[in-house]
Amino acid sequence: MRRREVAGLLVTLLLAWLVAYPLLLTGLESVRAPGGWTLEHWARFASAAHEWRTLWASLWIAAASVVLAGAVGIPLGFVMERFEFPGRRLLGALAALPIALPPLVGVIAFLFLYGESGFVSRAVQAALGLREAPWRLRGPGAILLVHAYSMYVYFYLYTRAGLARLDASMLEAAASLGAGRWRTFTRVTLPLLRPPLVGAAILTFMTALASFSAPYIFGGGFRVMTTQIVASKLSGDLAMATVETLALAAVALAGLTALRRTGGGRDMLGSGQKGAAAAPRQLRGGLPRTLAAVAGWGIAALLLLPHATLLLVSLVPPGAWTTELLPPLLSASNYGALLREPERLRPILNSLGMAAASTIAAVTLALVAARLVVVGRVRVRGWIEGLLSAPWAMPGTVFAMALATAFSVQQPWAGRWILVGTFWILPLAYLVRSLPLTGWAALAGLRQLDPALEEAAASLGAGRWRTLTRVTIPMIGPALAAGASLAFIMTLGDFVTSIVLYTYETRPISIEILAALREFDLGIAAAYGICLTALSALAFALGERRRGERRGERRAERREAR
Amino acid sequence: MPFLELERLSKRFGEIDAARDVSLSVERGGVLAILGPSGSGKTTLLRLVAGFEGPDAGRVIGDGADVTDSSPAARRFGMVFQHYALFPHLTVFGNVAFGLEAQGVPADRIRARVQEVLRLLDLAGFESRRIGELSGGQQQRVALARALAPEPRVLLLDEPLSNLDPALRERTRKELRALISRVGITTLFVTHDQEEAFDLGDRIAVMNAGRIEQVGTAEELYESPASLFVATFVGRANVARARVEAPPPAPRGVGTVDLGPVRWDAKITGAVQRGTPVTVVVRPEWLKLANGSDARALAAVVAERRYMGPAAVFAIDTATGATFEWVSDPDAARPGDRVSVAPDRPVLAFA
Ligand SMILES: Nc1ncnc2c1ncn2[C@@H]1O[C@H](COP(=O)(O)OP(=O)(O)OP(=O)(O)O)[C@@H](O)[C@H]1O
Ligand SMILES: [Mg+2]
């Protein structure tokens, strides 16, 4: 009994040291002057018009991203879930594809596609006989384009999941009460979809606010807070960077709280007895079917274009492609270079190693913490849960800056060591950012686990370790694997934290992509991008496979029960 | 000397007394049934015995040794859970072998013992099945096999039959009774089903709101219930209000109660005087057709007749104002008939 409470306190302390302490130190740093305290940095921030402009830019870009992503994702979700037409299944899966593109890779794919010397621009230029590129992919418009492309997936997936769980008998009930299609939609479907849609909006808002790659590559003179923080840090104005970091954190928290308020309360789709979802409506008649198919395949082409472009560019040998519309020569030489030259292979090994290590550590910590919360029901369980989730509410740049601040001095008595500039800082940062995904997976897994299973093991004479390894972990394995694979993918492609904290020795793939881009080694950059995408897809498939197995088992159980 | 003893066990959950001063004992090889309505604390009591919960007060004694502070594993009490709690990721073999593996039994002995237990439960050949591929009845037997395989000292069963459909339940009950007597294991099991408790338990403890109201054989509970709760929870009961006419000469002796239209002899429980209000309980089969001139005859009108084969159950509106159930032979009366009934033995009365 007591031992468990002590363990709870220790885990809370460890999590606080990882998550809350660096933020606290950043707060102190922002009001510190040599030998005393000062509000000077905050005053400087408050009186600079461009700082306010930047903060405002972050906010409206995030809000506009939500609107655009919703405008694309919700209708697409409805069409895919409610209408049956040739190729619906394949198209439905393709529509989730942008999520498998790490942010920086998506950005460079857009660059190769719609940038000044991208395929589409060249094609338009050639077709119209222009002397210059028809447009420049720069500024807020470009950022929003990338955001809409990569973030509509949240709305799309949440809409589909919501509709799939919507009991068809509710729609039938509305119809039998005399409600027309529009009335049913506005009075029944939409209100029931509200919680998942608000969930998608929150996810999009937080992602867009934290977005770094798109504004960094396409922003030009247009800054948002994430790029501004990195710029301040690089220019040596650390005090200002800490103030900006805290300002961004405050905006993130305020936005999150405000959106939660509109949450529309409880998820009502899961409540009550579960009926079957409405069957998709067959589109009848030649014309609608043809239109649907054409529109569908048009969308698919648009979605696949960035991936295809990346693949194509990765096959262009250095210097082989200059002014032609299509590359004249293709070879695998870029991939050869990645594998053969140790300096080029290094970032891949770095990323894999650091992502694997941080994911394993995050899973272990999450499992210990979640057990104390769910099974141990320790008194500090609210704190543990809050600390596990906290990194999710903070843009990656905020945590990178906080860790950079916390671990740049040697004060072992205060729990601070110099880790910046060493191997350790990046895996540590990845670990912190992986805590929410792995923590939620462990909490959800344990909450669904029938406590009687662990008790049964105990009454059969199994000790703690045996119960954990033979019952608990096998049972929650699928949930844990899914969380771990998402955390692994996020850290493998990480750019935001890495650009603040990397050292030359530990440089990850994303940093190397940036370096290649700067040297106009477009083929190499694309080849890295393809490698990263392929590794992410592999990790995703592995995580899903475990989940799929479990789903198959459950289906078998249900069949048996009937 | 009893093999399993519970001494004044108490457990509170916030405001709720899930177990209050529960003392019970089971002889070696005996079967004690705990019978109580939903929420009365049966599962909690079993979990206290198994060691999944620690009591606020009281002791659990197994084979003479205090095990109150022992871990569930150290107690070596086998438990069958209400929803079985079978490990879905293991096969039938894996489930049944689990406890033996935990004890570090060598592999060949495990195999032999698992085969033996599976044969005992008529599950031979099911070794490599997954739990999801079994019917409800088979799952129930696997749960039993798993609990019995490590040769526990005590078997704890939480509503072992409640998840089976009625036809299967009766058959499984017979098998379970045969199995327990063959293995000869000391057993504590809980149920809210009276028939199950009567059939399986040597003795039955009736539980209500965390308290044990009475412990006894089925006959004792039925014929001389210690409280109004036991009288009405166990078996069918007609209830009416009355006043004491003549208090019994000795406690729990026979006195007379006044129901208004009639006076009946009654075994009275509780301290009473002449005029004390009591609740009278009459079993439906204690009532017999009576001569209208008999002083103990209660006039009634037959409202309903339900034919049950060898007997019929009549609903009769009596002169006391209460509607009674009356069991008699099928053509004793028809709906609308005026009848007179009287009990063939002293009725029960509770102050
Ligand atoms: N862990 C717990 N926390 C709080 N209250 C509990 C807990 N376990 C049981 N209770 C409460 O204790 C009382 C007894 O519960 P218990 O499960 O023992 O009843 P039961 O007789 O087994 O009921 P059933 O026949 O429905 O299974 C109930 O009021 C229940 O709500
Ligand atoms: Mg129960």
Image (cartoon, coloured by chain):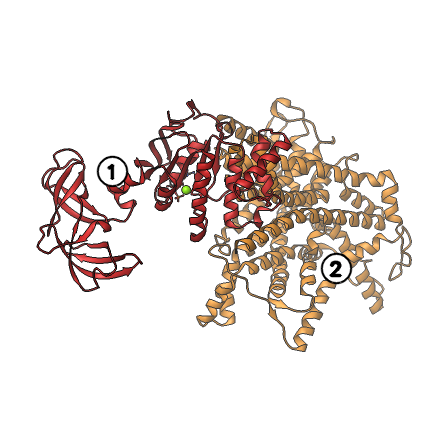
Chain colours: A orange, B red
Q: State whether residue A176 is above or below residue A412.
A: below
Q: CA distance from mark 2 to mark 1?
A: 79 Å
Is label 2 in contact with label 1 (beta carbons under 8 Å)?
no
Q: Is A416 displayed left or right of A353 in the figure? A: left
SS at badge 1: loop
Residue A191 placement (x, y as % from top left): 49, 60
Q: Which labelled disc corresponds to residue A304?
A: 2
Q: Quadrant of residue A121?
A: bottom right
Residue A38 placement (x, y as % from top left): 59, 32
Q: Ligand 1 is located in which of the four quadrants?
A: top left
Q: Do the residues at discs 2 and 1 belong to one chain?
A: no
Of residues A188 and A461, which is closer to you in this image? A461
What chain does badge 2 belong to? A
Residue at the (67%, 30%) spot, across then down: A407
Q: How many numbered tags mark residues here?
A: 2
Q: Is B289 displayed left or right of A421 in the figure? A: left
Residue at the (44%, 37%) spot, across then down: B181
Residue B285 is at least partly visible in this image: yes
Q: Quadrant of residue B16?
A: top left
SS at badge 2: helix
Q: State whether residue B46 is above or below residue B302.
A: above
Q: State whether residue B93 is above or below residue A263.
A: above
Q: Which labelled disc corresponds to residue B226?
A: 1
Of residues B32 and A170, which is closer to you in this image? B32
Dot 1 alpha-carbon crowd within 10 angstroms: few under 14, some 14 to 19, many 20 or more: many
